[in-house]
Amino acid sequence: MAEISLAILGMGRLGTSIGLALKRYMREGGSHRFSITGYDTVSSYAKTAKQMQAIDDIKNRPQEAVKGKDIIIIAMPYGEVETVYQMIAPNLRDGTVILDLSTLKQSPMQAVEKLLSPEVHVVSVAAVVNPKYLFDGVNETDRATEDYFDKGMMMLMPTVKCAQQAVTLAMDFSQLLGATPQFFDPSEHDALIAATELLPALLGVAYFYTMCHGDGWLDTQRLSNPFFGVLSRPLFDLHPDDLRAMWLSSGSHLIRNINEMILTLTRFRDLIMEKNDDALAVALDNTSKEYQAWINRRHNNKWKNERPIA
């Protein structure tokens, strides 16, 4: 039985769910014992995670949390990641494995190359979570669950100099959490995440910006219901600094998706303005059919051209 010391930096829903999944693993007789230390810039998040028994200990500074640890999980807001690497670099021992769950991969990888010793091994990881939570995007600590990664995938993107043992550890760790590991290219990941995470966040912000700057805002806000709240939710979950950092880091990937979205909105606007019932019906029917097919594939985690684990 191996005793493993682990630090989780970032105690939002993602980081706290990792702690809960590890606790489940140990509770169900797993062969490894994890001692888990948590840190978050917002101290109340770490306190909530400890109350939920996702972590064993809290540190008030990231450099204290990582000292002497075997594994470190980076689940910090995107705008804080490089600063955190700067702070923890002197306290990392040789052989430490870092699993970095930052939203975008290429910029943090550049920080790793610049700031960390080559004896510290970093694997960028992207979690595709349990389809059970596909429509529950609330990013709050108390929404964390032990099954958050079940029936999901972990996309693994090791740095070029990462030791094979660290890659194997990342694969085993993913399975321990309940996910299926797969290898992925970081540049491809960042291009795709611009479409699946950054564009939706931008649309939500742009929508709220449009509404709150409109002439009827004083009345409009009084009639806000779940559709309004869900679409504008990124402004609740994400700090403006993080949104700005992600959008600017994504650059051309996000711009391409914005341009395609503008064309689509223009197309739908024209169909509605022309009262083109037939063309609008075709567009909606085809979109609805593909949506249902996607939901089925996502819930069953069955995709064409499956990528091999190794």
Image: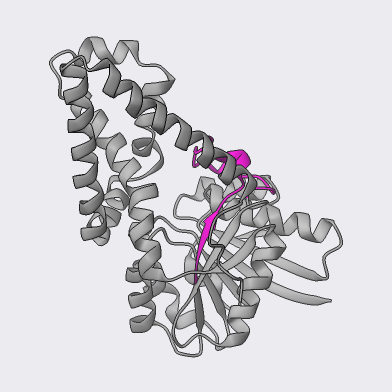
Q: Residue 204, can we see it?
A: yes
Residue drawn 55% across the image and 85% down it: 93
Q: Is residue 174 above or below residue 204?
A: below
Q: Quadrant of residue 283?
A: top left
- Which residue occupies the extreme left position in the image? 215
Question: Can residue 143 be spotted in the picture?
Answer: no
The one nearer the camera, 101 or 85, is 101
The quadrant holding residue 267 is top left
Q: In the image as oriented, which residue stretches furthest toward the right?
A: 29
Figure label count: 0
Q: Quadrant of the C terminus?
A: bottom right
Query: Where is 181 relative to 244, above or below?
Result: below
Q: Residue at x 41, y 26 (%)?
A: 285
Quarter containing the N terminus: bottom right
Residue 175 x %, y %: 69, 64
User: Does residue 125 belong to the magenta stretch?
Assistant: yes
Q: Is residue 213 above or below residue 299?
A: above
Image position, residue 16 (x, y; %): 60, 52
Give left or right: position of 260 versus 127.
left
Identify which residue is drawn at 36% across, 39% down.
234
Q: Position of residue 19 (x, y in %)?
A: 65, 56
Left or right of 113? Residue 207 is left
Q: What colour scheme was applied to this rendering of the protein?
A: one colour
In this orientation, which residue lies closer to the viewer: 257 or 106?
Answer: 257
Query: Does the magenta-highlighted stretch encompass residue 177?
Result: no
Q: Is residue 230 left or right of residue 99?
A: left
Classify residue 86 by image quadrant.
bottom left
Q: Which residues are magenta?
A: 124-148
Question: Residue 71, position in %: x, y?
Answer: 60, 74
Residue at 34% across, 26% down: 282
